[in-house]
Amino acid sequence: MAYQLPGKQKIALKEATKMWEDKTGKKLIEQTEVKFQMWIPPIEKMDGSTSLFPKCEFLSLSTNMIERISNLNSLKFLKVISVGRNLIKSLAGVEVCADTLEEIWASYNQIEKPTKGVLSCKKLRALYLANNWVRELGEVGKLNDLPKLEELVLVGCPVAERFIAASSEDEWEKEIGKKIKHLKKLDGQNLTHAETDE
C-alpha cells in the first residue's frame, strides 16, 4: 500500500505511519502485521515511531531507501523483518529483537558482514541475503553459532559466485553444509549433508 505526499522526495517512518493511519482509518497500535513496502515517497529513516506498533510480529519495509536498521526496541513480539531492496549496509540493530526474531529478509542491499547484529538472534530460522556484498566465507561460517538457522540464501553474493565459478554449485552446497551444520536449505535448495567418516 503506497501513498503520495506531494513535494517530498524521501520521508521518515514517522510521516509514513501518519499517512497509513489517515488513509486506512486504522490504528497501528492494534496491528500485528505492519507493511510499508514500496512507499511513495520512499522511507529513508527508521525512527522512534516503531513504538506506535508494539504488537507487531511482521514488519515489512522493503523497497525503500533505508540505510540503517534502528529503533526496534519497542517491538517485543517481532518475528519477521523484511528490509529487502533498501540501502542497508549492516544488520546491526536487529539484536534488540534477539529474543523473538525468527526470520530476516534482507536481499538486495549492500551487506558485507552478515553476522553483525545477527549472532545474538538465537531463534533465527531463516536469513535471506541474496544479492548483497557478502565476500568472506569465514564470515558465513560464523552463522553456525545460530542454533536454529535452517535456511540461508546467498545467491548473487560475491562469496557464492566466486566459489561456484571456481568449483560447482554442488561443492558450494557441501562447503556451506560443513560450515553451518544444522542448515537444511541453501539458496532455495534442500541440503543433503554428507556423512563424515569417523
Image (cartoon, rainbow, N blue to C red):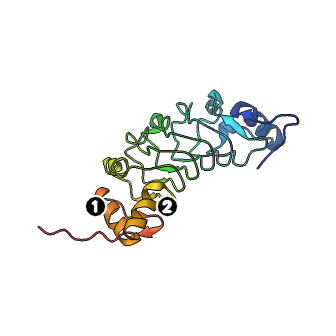
For residue 112, side relative to residue 70 (left or right): left
Q: Residue at x 84, y 37 (%)?
A: 5
Residue at the far front: name it. 166
User: Is residue 3 depicted above or below 131 in this figure?
Assistant: above
User: On the image, numbered disc 1 is attached to which residue?
Assistant: 178
The percent position of residue 86, horizontal first and vertical second, equals 63, 45
The percent position of residue 108, horizontal first and vertical second, equals 58, 52
For residue 113, side relative to residue 131 (left or right): left
Q: Which of 119/130 is in front?
A: 130
Quadrant in which residue 87 is drawn: top right
10 Å crowding of disc 1: few (<14), some (14-19), many (20+): some
Q: Secondary structure at mark 2?
A: loop
Quadrant in which residue 36 is drawn: top right
First in sequence, mark 2 or 1: give its number. 2
Task: Tell me, for residue 100, which label it has, or none.
Answer: none
10 Å crowding of disc 2: few (<14), some (14-19), many (20+): some
Identity, as a three-letter code, of the amino acid under mark 1: Lys
Tell me the distance, in whole angstroms, between the alpha carbons under discs 2 and 1. 18 Å
The percent position of residue 152, horizontal first and vertical second, equals 44, 58
For residue 9, side relative to residue 188 (left or right): right
Identity, as a three-letter code, of the amino acid under mark 2: Val
Please say if the residues under marks 2 and 1 sit with CB atoms less than 8 Å apart.
no
Q: Residue at x 47, y 64 (%)?
A: 187
User: On the image, numbered disc 2 is attached to which residue?
Assistant: 155
Q: Residue at x 40, y 43 (%)?
A: 115
Q: Secondary structure at mark 1?
A: helix
Quadrant in which residue 122 is drawn: top left
User: Is residue 125 depicted above or below 168 in this figure?
Assistant: above
User: Is residue 87 depicted above or below 14 in this figure?
Assistant: below
Q: Which of 25/166 is in front?
A: 166
